[in-house]
Image (cartoon, rainbow, N blue to C red):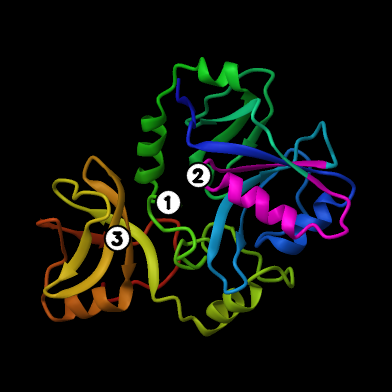
Amino acid sequence: MPIAHLADRALLTVSGPDARHFLHNVVTCNVNTLAAGGARYGALLMPQGKIISDFLIYAPASTPDTFLLDAPAATAPDLLKRLTMYRLRSKVEFAAADDLAVAAAWDGAQIEGIEAFPDPRLEALGTRLVLPRAQVEALDGDGEAYAAHRIALGIPQGGADFIYGDAFPHEADMDQLGGVDFKKGCYIGQEVVSRTQHRGIARTRAVEALFESAPEAGSEIRAGEKTVGRIGSSIRGQGIALVRLDRAAEAKAGGLPLVAGGVEVTLKRPDWATFNMDGV
C-alpha cells in the first residue's frame, strides 16, 4: 500500500482568532480562501524575495481557528522563530506539534477515519495524512518510494533541488505549482516575486533531468567550461536539476552536450509546467 511516513517533515500549529489573517498577510499563498479540510502550498520569504521555507498549509475541519504547517524538519525551527517575530499584536500562537507526524498516500491509498488533505501542488502527488507520531512510525510504507514518486512527476523539493535562503519562488517552480497567489496583494517579499512574474525574467528553473546513470547529487551540469546548473535528487535515470535555461539553450545552439559528473544529461520540462524551454 503506497502510504509512507515522511520522516523529513515536521508540523507546526498556527492558532488563534487572528491565525488566518496573520498567515494570509505573510505567506505567498491565499489563506483567506482556504476552506476547511483543504490545503495550500506556500512559503515564507525574505524581504528580498528568497525562500526561507516552503510548506503545505492544512485547515483541519475540526479546528477552524487552527492551521497546520507541513514543513521540512530542517527549516521548521527557523520558520517557527520567524513567524513568532512577525506576530506583533496579532492574536495568534505558534507551536511545534512534536506529537504529530506526516504521511503521504498516493495511487488511491487511504486510511479509514483519518482526514486526508489533497496535495495542492499536483493531484497525482496524492494526499497527506496527519497522524499521532507513534501511528505514523508504525506504517510499513517506504519513504524512498514516495521520493521516487515525486521525482517521477518532476516535483522539486527544497533542500535537495533548490537551496533555502538562495532560491526565489520562480526558480523552485512555485508559480507553476500553485504556491504563489499573484492577486492577493502584499506579503513579505511580494514586490520581488511580482516583478519577476510581470517581467517574465525567471531564467533559472527546476526541470527534469534524464541520464543513463545518476550523477552525484550536487554535481554541476556543464557545457564545455560553462556551468549551466546543478543536479538535485534523482532515481532510476531521472532527476531534478536547477538550471539556467538561457545557458542551456546557448549550449544546444552551439552543439555542446550537457554533462554532470561525466554523465550526459538531457533536460525536459515537467508535464505540468508552462514556462518556456524553447531551444533547450
Relative to 199, is 109 above or below? above
The three-letter code of the residue at mark 2 reads Ala
Contact between marks 1 and 2 (CB within 8 A): the answer is yes
Q: Secondary structure at mark 3?
A: strand
Give the CA distance from mark 1 to mark 3.
21 Å
Residue at the extreme bottom of the image, as rendered: 199
- Residue 159's label in the rendered image is 1
Q: Give coordinates of residue 73: x percent, y percent.
A: 53, 40
Is there any visible trace of residue 32 in the rendered image? no
Question: Where on the picture, by quarter, is residue 38?
Answer: top right
Residue 204's disc is none
Can you say which quadrant of the picture contains the C terminus?
A: bottom left
| Residue 10 versus residue 100 in the image, above or below | below
> Looking at the picture, does residue 103 appear above or below residue 78?
above
Mark 1: give few (<14), some (14-19) or many (20+) Cα within 10 Å.
some
Comparing labels 1 and 3, the label whose residue is closer to the camera = 1
Of the residues under marks 1 and 3, which one precedes in the sequence? 1
Crowding near the residue tagged with mark 2, few <14, some 14–19, many ≥20 C-alpha atoms within 10 Å: few
Q: How many marks?
A: 3
Q: Percent from the top left, x then y, of residue 95?
A: 72, 39
- Marks 3 and 2, the one that precedes in the sequence: 2
Q: CA distance from mark 3 to mark 2?
A: 29 Å
Residue sitting nearer the eye, 265 or 81: 81
Task: Give the residue pinned by disc 2.
Answer: 74
Callout 2: helix, strand or loop? loop
* Image mark for residue 268: 3
Q: Is residue 224 left or right of residue 187?
A: left
Residue drawn 66% across and 65% down?
Answer: 181
Q: Residue at x 56, y 21 (%)?
A: 136
Spot occupied by residue 129 in the image (x, y as percentages of width and height): 61, 30
Q: Which residues are magenta?
A: 66-93
| Residue at the image point whose x is 65% and y is 70% from the top | 182
